[in-house]
Amino acid sequence: MAGAGFARMTLTALVVLAGIAGPVAAQQAEPSTQAQPASPLQSSPASSATDAERPATSPSSATSVGADAEVSETPILQASPAMADSPATAPVSSNAPAVGPTTLPHDLSPWSMFIQADMVVKAVMVGLAFASLLTWTVWLAKGVELTGAKRNARSATRKLSSAESLADASREINAGWTKNGRVADLVNAALEELKRSTDLSAEGVKERLAIALSRIEAKASRDMARGTGLLATIGATAPFVGLFGTVWGIMNSFIGISQSKTTNLAVVAPGIAEALLATAIGLVAAIPAVIIYNVFARAIAGYRALLSDASGEVLQHMSRDLERQEKGIAPAKTIHAVHTMGTIASAAE
């Protein structure tokens, strides 16, 4: 009896357990089928079923899981606007300035740069232009003067060399256009010294005449070199004056750059070009001045050499004339003329 009762109780328990297990299995299968259309952001069906069972056993854990789900979804939702506004997909603005040819705000012709320059730079440019004008004026005037003087000296020296005596040379030189030259002054100085020294020794006359002739040569060279010192001054100082104008102009350009707060080449270039124009004008004034000065220096040295030759001819004529006076000998032309006149007279008889 006892064994039969235990068997009935066991069978009854199995039936009860079977009745309870059926609804539980159906409840577990229903969340798994509902989890299939879930979004990609949710977990797998197994984890969804587990989360569905948790509210029945632990409500606090379900709340924490829901909070974790919201936290995990938040970065993805915030990333969407950033991706929409990223540089790779953002449209290019149509209001961007078009790139065109660069235009300078100033006319860079020399006259325009002079007009737009600072007053100090303008003063430097005007001074250098005036110096250049003086250079060419001296070149023209001194060139004409030096050419005429050298031509006069050559012609007078030829006459002096062909004369038999100092008196004959004086007549030939003072008869033509050579009478206003320096060689004529040399001959006249010799004749004047000869008149003053008629009762003095010949050696003293020669020494005094040599001193007088050297002074005439020095005076002629000094007069001919007058004005060339200005050329030397212009050639030496004009580049530095132009450099001063350039430094002043560039300084003003830097001040303008600091005030405009820009380093754009279109803004900086005009001021620097105006400053460099001063140096260019300085070189234009200095280079011709140096060249012309050197040419005149050589030409004046050649002119003084011509006067030295003429002075030597005068001294030779003076020495011959003094010896003729001592010996009482007439010049060769005078002797020849006297001999010819005597021959003619003898033939007439």
Image (tube, rainbow, N blue to C red):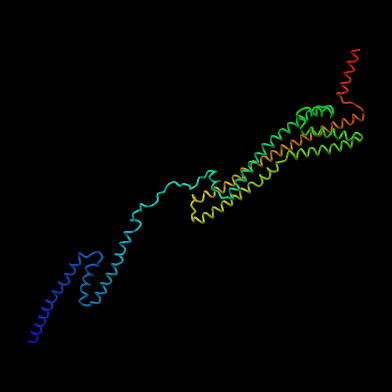
Indicate the position of residue 141 as horizontal and vertical percent values.
68, 37
Left or right relative to 37: residue 140: right
Q: Nearer the viewer, residue 42 or 230?
A: 230
> At which x and y percent is residue 44?
23, 67
What residue is shown at x 68% (from left), y 45% (from top)?
233
Is residue 40 depicted above or below 209 in this figure? below
Q: Residue at x 72, y 41 (%)?
A: 226
Image height of 160 relative to 74, above or below: above
- Give left or right: position of 102 versus 87: right
| Residue 314 shown left or right of residue 238 in the figure | right
Task: Determine which quarter of the picture holds residue 74.
Answer: bottom left
Q: Position of residue 86 (x, y in %)?
A: 34, 58
Identify the image quadrant of the N terminus: bottom left
- Quadrant where the C terminus sits is top right
Nearer to me, 166 or 320: 166
Q: Nearer the viewer, residue 164 or 188?
A: 188
Q: Spot the residue most to the top.
A: 349
Q: Residue 95 at what x, y percent from top left?
A: 37, 52
Query: In the displayed image of the protein, which residue is found farthest to the left?
Result: 1
